[in-house]
Image (cartoon, helix red, strand yellow):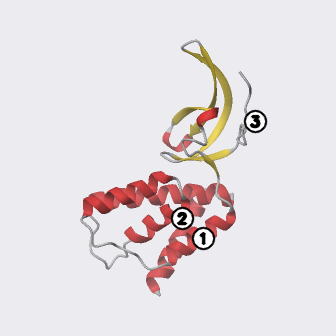
Amino acid sequence: MTKTKKSEFRPNDYVVYPAHGVGQIVSIEEQEIAGLTLELFVISFEKDKMTLRVPTNKATEVGMRSLSTPDVVSKAMATLKGKAKVKRAMWSRRAQEYEQKINSGDLISIAEVVRDLHRTDDQREQSYSERQLYEAALERLTREVAAVSGVDEAGAQKQVDEVLVSRAAA
């Protein structure tokens, strides 16, 4: 078996796994599965108290990526400032699109969901499912902003809130 190029991911790296958000590679281990030796990334999602094992050769295929660059984070923050774009489609259809954006692992798409579902105090109530999607997107965004900026989650949450509040005031 020829070794493909060494992966760009290393232990201690923070990575983004589309379905779960920001995690940290704890180690790379070999495991024998059905007579085959597989090399796996062991990724810890501390917040969710969850560990994921991803075959190293499948990591990019499943959309695992390095943290966004500060540049992408700035673009995501700028996206938050934009005007909400809410399609006139049925909620179930929109909810599906929001979910796809959240699980795409793409920070800009996630920021779009936060922007589109954000409510100020004087706006109509959010439905339960809107709230769930909003919080999922917000959490993904906040965790990645925190990991990229090297601040804690509360600090990142504050940055995001400030942008959303300034938008509301505009």
**Residue at coordinates 66% horizontally, 46% vertically from top-left?**
14
Judging by the rendered image, the residue that carries numbered circle 2 is: 108
- Cβ–Cβ under 8 Å for marks 2 and 3: no
Q: In the rendered view, would you say 134 is above or below 79?
A: above
Q: Are marks 2 and 1 in contact (CB under 8 Å)?
A: yes
In this rendering, the label closer to the viewer, 1 or 3: 3
Q: Which secondary structure lies at badge 1?
A: helix
Amino acid type, callout 3:
Lys
> Looking at the image, which residue is at 29% across and 57% down?
129
Q: Nearer the viewer, mark 2 or mark 3?
A: 3
Q: Is residue 67 above or below residue 75?
A: above
Kindly indicate whether the residue at mark 3 contacts the one at mark 1 (C-beta within 8 angstroms). no
Residue 126, how many percent across, how many down? Answer: 29, 67
Does dot 3 land on a helix, a strand or a loop? loop
Residue that carries the numbered disc 3 in the rendered image: 6
Cα gap from disc 2 to disc 1, whole angstroms: 7 Å
Q: Residues within 10 Å of mark 1 (few under 14, many from 20)?
A: some
Q: Give the residue at mark 1.
A: 75
- How much space separates mark 1 and mark 3, taking CA atoms? 30 Å
**Image spot of residue 57 (x, y percent):** 63, 33
Q: Secondary structure at mark 2?
A: helix
